């Protein structure tokens, strides 16, 4: 499968490599059979829709030590969210450490539900929700996540169009 030629040092890096549903299903199946093949993945502008990403995520869940996913300029919606929750629930030492969703087509309600899933005990160290349609409700969930989690070391919420808030009080509440 030509897509697997893009694996280097256990990282699958696909940038502007258009994936069809057949590619996504095949990737998902390959991950089920080669459980140690990769531990990181980057899908950058691959034309992936929600159903396709859900198929990939089902396979990623079978990988033994998958740590990092970067997902840019693709679609993230309900089917992907269902499968992503399962990744977030993985326990140490096979937990997901880094998640970056950047400039994806994502509804504000999906972002809110993703943050709710993250509140349900995940072990992420680095989180990026760049241009992910954060709302006031999702900001409250993010604040709660940062207060509860002892694992998160880094967070990136750039390029979200947030209403002006008193950032000093937001930071004070986290302390």
Image (cartoon, grey):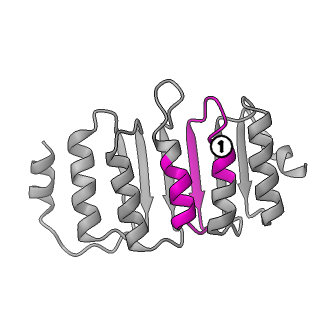
- Relative to 159, is 40 on the left or the right? right
Residue 167 appears in the picture as rendered: yes
Q: Farthest residue in the right direction?
A: 1
Expressed as whole percent of the image width and height from the top left, the position of residue 91 reads 46, 30
Report the number of discs. Answer: 1
Coordinates of residue 7 in the picture (x, y in percent): 78, 41
Q: Nearer the viewer, residue 68 or 141?
A: 141
The verdict on residue 105 being magenta is: no
- Above or below: residue 69 compared with residue 134: above
| Front in this rendered view, residue 85 or 15 | 85
- Provide residue 28's location: percent of width, then percent of height: 74, 48
User: Closer to the camera, 69 or 165?
Assistant: 69
Q: Name the residue: 65% across, 45% down.
A: 41
Which residue is rendered at x = 59% and y = 69% of the image? 75
Magenta range: 56-85
Q: Residues within 10 Å of mark 1 (few under 14, many from 20)?
A: many
- Residue 94 sits in quarter: top right
In the shown orientation, is residue 50 left or right of residue 109? right
Q: Can you name the residue that lies furthest to the top here? A: 93
**Location of residue 157 in the rendering, given as x and y in whole percent from the top left corner:** 36, 59
The answer to whether residue 131 is above or below residue 5 is below
Q: Is residue 37 left or right of residue 152?
A: right
What is the quadrant of the C terminus in the image?
top left
Residue 118 is left or right of residue 40, and the answer is left
- For residue 4, which quarter of the picture? top right
Circle 1 sits in a helix, a strand or a loop, which is it? helix
Q: Which residue is mark 1?
A: 60
Residue 156 shows up from this direction: no
**In the image, residue 62 lies in the stretch drawn in magenta:** yes
């Amino acid at each position: 499968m030509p897509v697997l030629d893009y694996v280097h040092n256990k990282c699958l890096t696909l940038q502007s490599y258009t994936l069809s549903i057949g590619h996504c299903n095949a990737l998902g199946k390959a991950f089920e059979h080669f459980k140690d093949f990769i531990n990181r993945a980057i899908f950058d502008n691959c034309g992936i829709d929600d159903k396709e990403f859900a198929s990939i995520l089902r396979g990623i869940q079978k990988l033994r030590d998958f740590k990092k996913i970067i997902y840019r300029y693709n679609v993230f919606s309900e089917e992907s969210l269902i499968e992503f929750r399962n990744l977030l629930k993985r326990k140490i030492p096979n937990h997901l450490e880094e998640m970056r969703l950047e400039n994806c087509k994502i509804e504000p309600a999906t972002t809110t539900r993703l943050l709710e899933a993250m509140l349900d005990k995940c072990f992420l160290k680095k989180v990026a929700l760049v241009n992910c349609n954060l709302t006031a409700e999702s900001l409250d969930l993010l604040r709660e996540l940062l207060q509860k989690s002892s694992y998160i070391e880094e967070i990136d919420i750039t390029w979200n169009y947030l209403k002006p808030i008193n950032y000093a009080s937001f930071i004070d509440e986290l302390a």
